[in-house]
Image (tube, grey):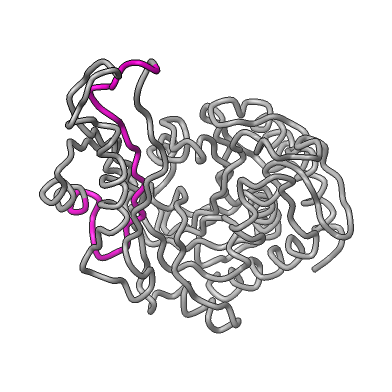
Amino acid sequence: MENIIVNDAVKLLKDLISIKSFSGSENKTADTIQNWFNDRKIKCYRKNNNVFALNKKFDKKKPTLLLNSHHDTVLPNKAYTKDPFLAHVENGKLYGLGSNDAGGALVSLISTFKYFYNVENLKYNIIIAATAEEESSGPLGLNSLLIDLPKLDIAIVGEPTEMKLAIAEKGLLVLDVIIEGTPSHAAHENNDSAIEKLPDAINWFKNFKFEKISKILGPVKVTVTQVNGGSQHNVVPSDVNLVVDIRVNDCYSNLEILQIIKKSSPYRIESRSLDLNSSSIDENHGIVLAASKIGMEKYGSPTLSDQAKLNFPSIKLGPGDSKRSHTANEFIYLSEIETGIDLYIKLLKEIL
């Protein structure tokens, strides 16, 4: 890959890292991306903090490929020892909040879009969308932008996958679970304490198994992630609340998972949302075959992305490693960005 393309991408990523862009507060990174397009004479559009552009020779008669990644981040992990907003390179690693998730993928896709922007006689139109609120699944992210875009036929969602092709990803269902008991003064005996029921409740969710196992995504994963209960040292509370994180495979819808849990569980359960379902693409789809042709490895991703917002075929693909996401001293290798741009362009050449 030409150094000028890679250097331009890295410069943009450094600029983005230096700006705080927590979910719902991405206006300054949106400004930076918008200015990047304007400086390169690429006409772009903006809705809230979502910035998008269409290839110059856009033809409504042709199918359309969406390139998408996000520019929002989570809050810095408390274990950071480096300044999360100081983009700097050490031993080939570019450090900074959002460098891996998903800045590397975002700037690589933007560079790929620029590479094809002026190309004529493409089989597909191309749209690049740098979107907001992915980390929070907020209302003003990709889902709010889709209604303003032309009809979309296929998408590449940029997330750190080590440039392996995610042909499926698990969905997410978050449950609020209430363990009920009898409130009392701590000085008196209580054989119906909600807190004392807690170990059994945690074990119930830990040991609950769903019957269907996906060939690509494996089993449904159920994890208790939060426990809340009690307000004073001398009061036994009437209930204890659990938060349960369920990663749903492509054998179930979120609604089916909720119905099964409610039918089986002895606890009171409410779901926060049913919208973030698992997604997958036919292994014989043209983009999957094209990726296989250039040697990309296929897998099923355990993590969620904005892919869950799409109702048409999509893949998840990008430089970086998901295991680095949301960790302290987040980084991406400069070589991963170079490889990412190179493989994105090779993949698009196969289908365009």
What residue is at 55 percent from the left and 78 percent from the top? 297
Q: Residue 212: horizontal and vertical position, in percent? A: 23, 69
Relative to 192, say whether 223 is above or below.
Answer: below
Q: Is residue 255 magenta?
A: yes
Residue closer to the observer: 70 or 226: 226
Q: Residue 47: horizontal and vertical position, in percent? A: 51, 30
Q: Is residue 278 left or right of residue 286?
A: left
> Which stretch did the figure color magenta?
233-257
Relative to 245, say whether 184 is above or below.
Answer: above
Residue closer to the observer: 200 or 185: 185
Q: Is residue 195 left or right of residue 169?
A: left
What residue is at 34 percent from the left and 57 percent from the top? 278
What residue is at 56 percent from the left and 63 percent from the top? 317
Q: Residue 106: horizontal and vertical position, in percent? A: 64, 50
Q: Is residue 269 left or right of residue 352?
A: left
Q: Residue 194: horizontal and vertical position, in percent? A: 24, 31
